[in-house]
Image (cartoon, rainbow, N blue to C red):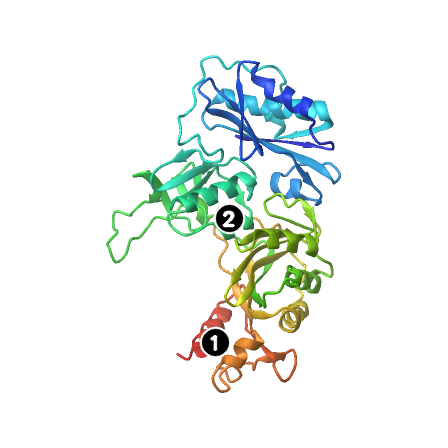
Amino acid sequence: MTKDVIALTKKMPDPLSVLAGLLSGGPDLLAGAEGEGAVVQLCDQQGRPLVSVEAPLLVQVRGEAERLLGAQEPEVPYWWTEARATTGVQEAEELAGTFAARIATLVGGTAWPPQAAWSMAVVKTDGMTVAPAPAAAQPAVDVLTDKVAVVIQDRPVVAMTAWLSDAFRAAGNAGLGLQIVTPAGTRLSPAVRNSLPGWPSRWVVQDDRDGYYDGLTGAVLQWSNGLFATVESPEATPEDPRTPVAASFREGTQDTGERQLAISFRTVHPADDRLVLGGAVEAVWRDVTGEPPAGWGTEEPANLPWSLRQLTDVAHERAPEPTWLVVVGTPERPGLATVRITRTKGGVEEDVTLAFGYGPGEQIPADAVVAAAESLATRHDLQSMLVQIRRARRDLSVPAHFEGPGVPYAFVLGAEEVREMPGDRARRTPLPEAPRELGPKTRPALYYPFRGDPSDLSGWQDFERLMRHLKGS
């Protein structure tokens, strides 16, 4: 049974409904709170958490339950109430299901997954045991060692939920890696993929044939010395590790005709109290899709309708600390961006990683890419931009098999960076096609087109030649 259970309701769960849900284990279980009351917990007699319940989240963005859960959602707006059971305790999983079933019944709505929330009866909890702290101290962490924090997720798509975001933050502050363990068939949200740091953090996939493997590289893994580490081949040498690759990772790599347009860019704005943030993301979205983003949030599901003013207010309130955001599109044109806003000596930086999904027969709008680059270069203080096309899922989720890297399609150098280049280096390049000027003639940005196509590597060759040239090597 899944460890996470979610109630989707049209009305906000009222205090009496939440109380009825918390009594799913009878009156003898203890109730506690974490995160200044944002998380309510059902605990055993020693105060160890059995079930952690997040504060209800009002979702005002259409399609998030379908994208992350594969569930039919109520008409927006609706309330998303999430309960997570302590791993390895059967009664805790039943408590979470009963809690969600009671909330959905009393307030009106549904629970996900349906098979987890089938009973509203009191769960027998006599004699159950829970792992002692520190493993149970962080609601999202299932195993804690001196090297990594391990999170076990059994969901269709692992999303950057408030719990997982807290686990990322706690692991980073403690100097630990974060390892996410999922069953076969689970996918990652791009928001999680883009936030996963380097070694020893990794996505660990359970596999019937090879035990465990890395969902992003395919390397076969084993639990050793307090973390999941790669398995060495018997023929391995220090110069050639020869890490085995899981058979499941190599399978399912046929071309389905699905594509993604991936755009990464950085803007650097002068620091000003009147600065409005998010305009660069909106400009690209409008140029590529013809409409603004559908919603945004500081976690997944993205719950807020698109608003430059609200986004800017959140970033200003958090300054000088950085702000991380997720931006989403509509189900008709899948799009997702992660945005990191940081105050630096140079001003206010927005680092954006964005992708749009296209199905078989849908054309990627080449003219829109140039228009988006022009918008960023002329109105949004663009520093640099890389555009890639890749063979990948239209819904943008990351599967645990090989998809291949994106192929560079174009690169844009901002006007300030062009001006700082010595001589005419930025304009005289070794590429087959000359760069295109964007913006004012007196201070243009430069757009470098490549021969990018997922069927060959010519785009990478062009990109590498250009980077060496711009660096003067």
- Distance from disc 1 to disc 2, alpha carbons, whole Å, reads 34 Å
Quadrant (top left, top right, bottom left, bottom right) of the C terminus? bottom left
Q: Amino acid at mark 1?
A: Leu
Q: Secondary structure at mark 2?
A: loop
Q: Is residue 114 visible?
A: yes
Nearer to me, 404 or 82: 82
The structure residue drawn at horizontal position 42% and vertical position 80%, both measured from the top left corner, is 472
The quarter holding residue 446 reads bottom right
**Outermost residue, front side:** 273
The structure residue drawn at horizontal position 41% and vertical position 48%, both measured from the top left corner, is 218
Which mark, residue 387?
A: none
Q: Position of residue 236 (x, y in %)?
A: 26, 51
Q: Is residue 388 visible?
A: no
Q: Which residue is mark 1?
A: 466
Q: Amino acid at mark 2?
A: Gly
**Outermost residue, right side:** 75
The structure residue drawn at horizontal position 46% and vertical position 78%, both measured from the top left corner, is 470
Q: Which residue is mark 2?
A: 252
The quarter holding residue 181 reads top left
Nearer to me, 337 or 26: 26
The residue mark sitting in front, 1 or 2, is: 1
Q: Position of residue 87 (x, y in %)?
A: 46, 28
* 285 to the left or right of 30: right
Q: Position of residue 242 (x, y in %)?
A: 31, 52
Q: Position of residue 116 (x, y in %)?
A: 59, 25
